[in-house]
Structure formats: structure tokens, C-alpha cells
Image (tube, rainbow, N blue to C red):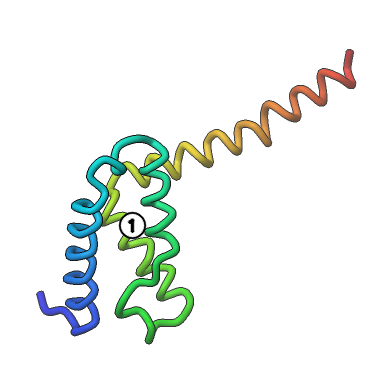
Amino acid sequence: MKYSQSEQAFSTDTKAGEKAEHESNGKESKGFRAAIRRVKHDLRAPLPGTEHLGRWGRIKARFVHLVKRYGWKLIVAIILYYLVRDTLFFIIIPYLVARHFID
């Protein structure tokens, strides 16, 4: 499978950055707060090789990068977030409001 120069540069830069990050964060990489910090950094850091892409292309590249890095855990986190949010907004709050007005 042939890759363009930007994709090759992106993959080598990402691997080198991940290795350097893991080496520098030896003690800090443990724990929930450190994991949240790493995810926030991955969301905000500019991806090399995506300057020529439009907005949606950069969003797609970022999502693919995050799925490659975090795998199934990212998908589970997204599903759980929306499950909890929708349950709260569309089931629990309307139930409590209706119960208040009916009683």
C-alpha cells in the first residue's frame, strides 16, 4: 500500500512523538487525570501534514488519529457519554418534571 509523503511524515512523527511522550512522562502517565491530560493534548495539538486539508478533512484526520491511538476505548467512551447524556436529558429529567406536576 503506497502512502503519500504527508501520510508517511504524519505516521513517523506520531510514532516518534508518542515514544518521546511516554519516556518523558514515566510517573505522570499513571492515573485518570494524566489520561485525561493526554487525551486533551491529542485533541488540541496540530497534526503534521494536514495543513493542505479543508476543515472536514482535518476533522476526519484527527478522528482517525485518535481511533488509531486509543482504539476501542475511544469508541466505548463516546458511546457511554452519549448514553448517559441522553438518558439524563430525555428520560430522567422529563420523568422528574412530570412527577412533580402530576402529584
Quadrant where the C terminus sits is: top right
Residue that carries the numbered disc 1 in the rendered image: 66
Quadrant where the N terminus sits is: bottom left
Which percent across, then down, holds residue 92?
68, 26
Along the viewing direction, whichever of 100 and 25 lies nearer the viewer: 25
Q: Image point 39% across, 51% down: which residue?
A: 39
Along the viewing direction, whichever of 13 and 29 lies nearer the viewer: 29
Q: In this view, does 38 lie above or below 62?
A: above
Outermost residue toward the left? 1
Q: Image point 41% across, 73% down: which residue?
A: 58
Q: In this view, does 56 lie above or below 68?
A: below
Q: Can you tell which quarter of the image residue 41 is in?
A: bottom left
Left or right of 64, for residue 100: right
Q: In this view, does 9 lie above or below 52?
A: above
What secondary structure is found at the residue carrying circle 1?
helix
Tally of marks: 1
Q: Image point 38% across, 40% down: which residue?
A: 76
Q: Can you tell which quarter of the image residue 4 is in?
A: bottom left
The amino acid type, in three-letter code, at marker 1 is Leu
Q: Can you tell which quarter of the image residue 49 is in?
A: bottom left
Which percent across, then down, holds residue 98?
82, 23
Q: How crowded is mark 1: few (under 14 residues within 10 Å), some or many (20 or more)?
A: some
Which percent across, then down, holds residue 68?
26, 56
Along the viewing direction, whichever of 64 and 23 lies nearer the viewer: 23
